Image: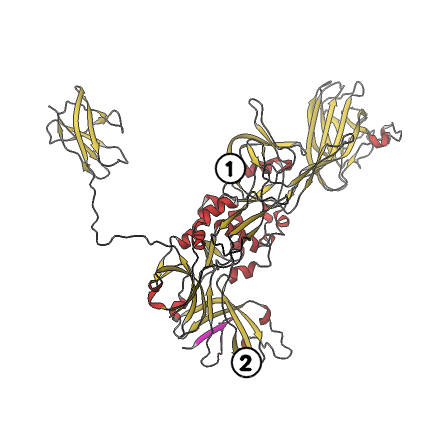
Amino acid sequence: MSLLLYINGQLIDLDAGQYIAQTKQVNDLNSLDDRQASYTNKFKLPKTANNIRAMDQMTLSGNLSNVPYQKNTCSLFNDVGECFVYNGWAVITDGGDYYEAVVYDGIIDLFKEVEKDTLASIGLDELTHEKTPETVAQSWTQDLPYRYILADYNGKRIYSRGALNFPDRINIDYMVPSINVAWLWGKIFSHYGFTYSGSVFESDEFKNLWLTYPKGLENSGEVIFQSVPDKWHWLKRYKAEWKTYSASFYDAEINELGGDQPEDNVRYLTAPEAGNYRLTVKGKLAVSTKVNLVVCKNANDYGTFLNPEYIPIPEFFTLKENINSQEEFTVSKNFRLEENDSICLVFRNPSDKFFFWYTPSLNVTLTKLTIGEMNFSNALADFSIKDFIKEIVYRFGLTLFKDKYTNNYEFLSLTEQLKTPAVVDWSNKFAKKLNESYIYGSYAQQNWFRYKYNTEGAFHNDHYITVNNQNLAESKDSINSKIYSPEQQLSFLDAPTNIYKLWEKEVVEEPENDEPPVTYKALDKRFYLMRANLRQGTVRAVSSALASTALASRYYRESFTKLSFSDIINTYYTPLQSILEKALIVNAELYLTDSDISNFDFKKLYYIDALSSYFMVNKINNYIPGRLTKCELVRVNYTPIQREYNVVPTIRLNTINIHNVVQLTPLSYIINYETNFTPVSNLVYQYSPDGVNWKTAQVQQSPRQPDTVITPVPATHFRVRYEATRTLSNTFILD
């Protein structure tokens, strides 16, 4: 039987009688940290004129062929059209007189596509945002792919209980967002043109799984200007009208040099760089009438303030309106300035002239704000997509299967693969058993699943799969996660909470004046997984650094439920443990055909009567048509579902039986009845004066029985009907 080989859509010449040995495998469970693809042995391609053209002149002098460096799409058929490989991956090398080729199939496409890419490669710019109270509150009240989850990140305290009739406060400065794993998973597959399926993706455990931003990034502020307390001057803007005054302040540094005249001090505050700023003004005025405090921008070139001619000043915003004399006030405003933009303070009353009785108390602070920009593309640039996919596969005990003809990947849990699979009887294909072994793969007696930790030697969220076989090594690490574990101890916010360390606290011994006793150093490359549990109730998101707040009707707090490796192993790996406890691996020769190979399904279990067992086919080695094929079979402790055949099902009829009817009044009755079923809708009570003409009675108490019914005329005959099935009770005649 001849073969048809297509590479990059072109039919390739093969030597007469050439065969291509094929090995089929999928996610070999011999090793939990490895994922494998099917492949062929290396085979030769003659250097015919057709093949040289197909290889774009590869190996000819001066050629610029890209074939040795690219993905070469490959399909392999037999001469009756049965497909062994569809859109596989051919690797071509030079073998001298021949080209040499190896063809890979199965999950190779997925891992080859992503092997050099990181999570930043799929484009996460849509997640970029500034960490402000507004954006944090939006992540609580809107369905966004990122969410700020209340947890202890080892920064400054972020939660405080509100007083009576006041909402609780969550300080966002030392919080970080988390990205939804389900959203990120879908984004990856969509980016590469793949689809996926599997029941695990519909579970709450998958949908409510969140990956943290990997580094601490807080909001902060740097003081750009601080006036000398209670010392300032003013200049009249309009000499004739006295309706506008410009404030001029003493700067602490200038004042130390002895300056005491308005021209020696600060009238304009200039932004050293583009960014967000906060202006704070505190004090009280001694003024003849109410005034507005206005901030003007880039007013430097508008001439002297003593010029009586009207010259408009460009207002930026009003900081406070209608300030009374001797009114103590504190006002603050956040805004953006570009580099070298300047602002000044102006007192105005557009309607009335005014004057200051004496120099009032007024203090001014301009702060350059550093708002944390949460840029997931930059933050996830060190997390490879291949590692991320493996992390999900590990946590749910998944095996992935690629559809032969499409780019869909089906993910099955070990329970689905080993406990509830489809079964095929291969008894007639069994030839002989070559040998059997009792150690499966590279397992040890304790096979550890391990997190990363901030503290050396910690292992509190690690766990292991046990194999009771004393001939194995005592212990090994099967899974080493890239994800960090939360700390062993808990802290308390609104409730006991895990600590996901993204800041390192450093206590300052003998702090100097104005030096904080504790500093917080941001950590990097700390990825954590958590869940987000909804908490209802009004809460206020607060930024101390930005001096701004936002209200929300709910928030989310962290949970580590079912994320310790102990929970993961007990939930998802029990079927594998049952295989490993009494491992039996049989190497056998089977009679397989082209049809068996082209249609083989690793998702099924295969029963062999001669071996009296069900088996998972771990590998089909070097299939060649017409020859016995060596297969590696792993015994599975599978019990088929027992089914009864040729049994006529018993039909259970709904029945209603009235025991008696009690007359309460001339027109009201209690009907006592029983049913052999639970009605899903109300019953209908009927009455008749003669047992022939029936009408529906009014129900006074329903649907509980005994029920009281009301009739417009006296009745002697009663019955109950279940309208959903038209089931009718017996007729009860009242004496």
SS assignment at label 2: loop
Q: Residues within 10 Å of mark 1 (few under 14, many from 20)?
A: some
Outermost residue on the right side: it is 258
- Which residue does the numbered mark 1 point to in the structure image? 533
Chain part drawn in magenta: 3-14
Q: Residues within 10 Å of mark 2 (few under 14, many from 20)?
A: some
Residue at image coords 48%, 66%: 87
Question: Image quadrant of residue 540?
Answer: top right
Does residue 67 appear left or right of residue 329 in this picture? Answer: left
- Which residue does the numbered mark 2 point to in the structure image? 47
> Is residue 9 shown above or below 307?
below
Q: Is residue 543 magenta?
A: no
Q: Dividing the image into 4 quarters, which one contains the C terminus?
A: top left
Query: Which is the main secondary structure of the residues drawn in magenta?
Result: strand
State yes or no: discs 1 and 2 in contact (Cβ < 8 Å).
no
Instruction: Return the x and y of residue 585 as percentages of the image width and height.
Output: 43, 61
How was the colour assigned to the protein in this rendering?
Answer: secondary structure
Question: Image quadrant of residue 656?
Answer: top left
